[in-house]
Image (cartoon, grey):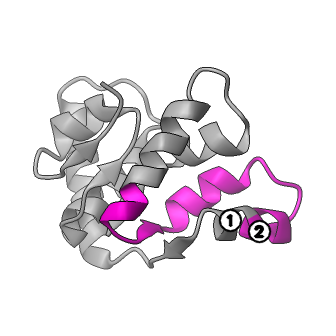
Amino acid sequence: MIFVDTNVLIDVASADPNWMEWSIDALTEATRRGPLVINAVVYSEFSLGFASKAACDAEIERFDLRYLDLPKSAAFRAAVAFRDYRRRGGAKTNVLPDFFIGAHASVLGVPLLTRDTGRYRAYFPDVELIGAA
């Protein structure tokens, strides 16, 4: 099982000129390792680009993603990591979704496919990251 971060999906869905090719290749390789999963946080972030739930769901289906509920243990882990981030001087307040994503991958014990590895590496060192070099 591989947890997929929102940025990888957006790269492909929006045909990002800088990242689409990398993201397609990374998704293809990740699929060889196991099923691809997302949670409500990724779904919500990704859905911002769609006019309807049906359109978003069709794109999610195209990626062959499985939806997992966020367990309470992951929600707590996200809060602990976010609190640590703020104590270390983290000034951005809009990053909490990344902590939910990293915590969910951590609690599941699965790799995380993302192109934004820095924060995940710092606050979820137990998570194997599949990211851009």
The magenta stretch spans residue 53: yes
Q: Residue at x 87, y 64 (%)?
A: 52
Quarter holding the N terminus? bottom left
Residue 131 falls left or right of residue 11: left
Residue 58, labelled with which disc?
2
Please determine whether, in this image, residue 15 is positioned above or below residue 13. above
Residue 39 falls left or right of residue 43: left
Q: Residue at x 36, y 62 (%)?
A: 32
Q: Nearer the viewer, mark 2 or mark 1?
A: 1
Tell me the SS state at disc 2.
helix
Can residue 84 be seen at all in this image of the molecule? no
Residue 87 falls left or right of residue 45: left
Please determine whether, in this image, residue 114 is positioned above or below residue 101. above
Residue type at mark 1: give it: Arg
The magenta stretch spans residue 78: no
Q: Residue at x 21, y 68 (%)?
A: 107
Q: Residue 21, percent across and down? A: 56, 32
Whether pointer 2 and pointer 1 mark residues with C-beta atoms closer than 8 Å, the reply is: yes
Please determine whether, in this image, residue 14 is positioned above or below residue 5. above
Residue type at mark 2: give it: Ala
Q: Which region of the structure is painted magenta?
A: 30-58
Distance from disc 2 to disc 1, alpha carbons, whole Å, reads 6 Å
Per the image, the residue denoted by label 1 is 62
Q: Residue 133, percent across and down? A: 30, 24
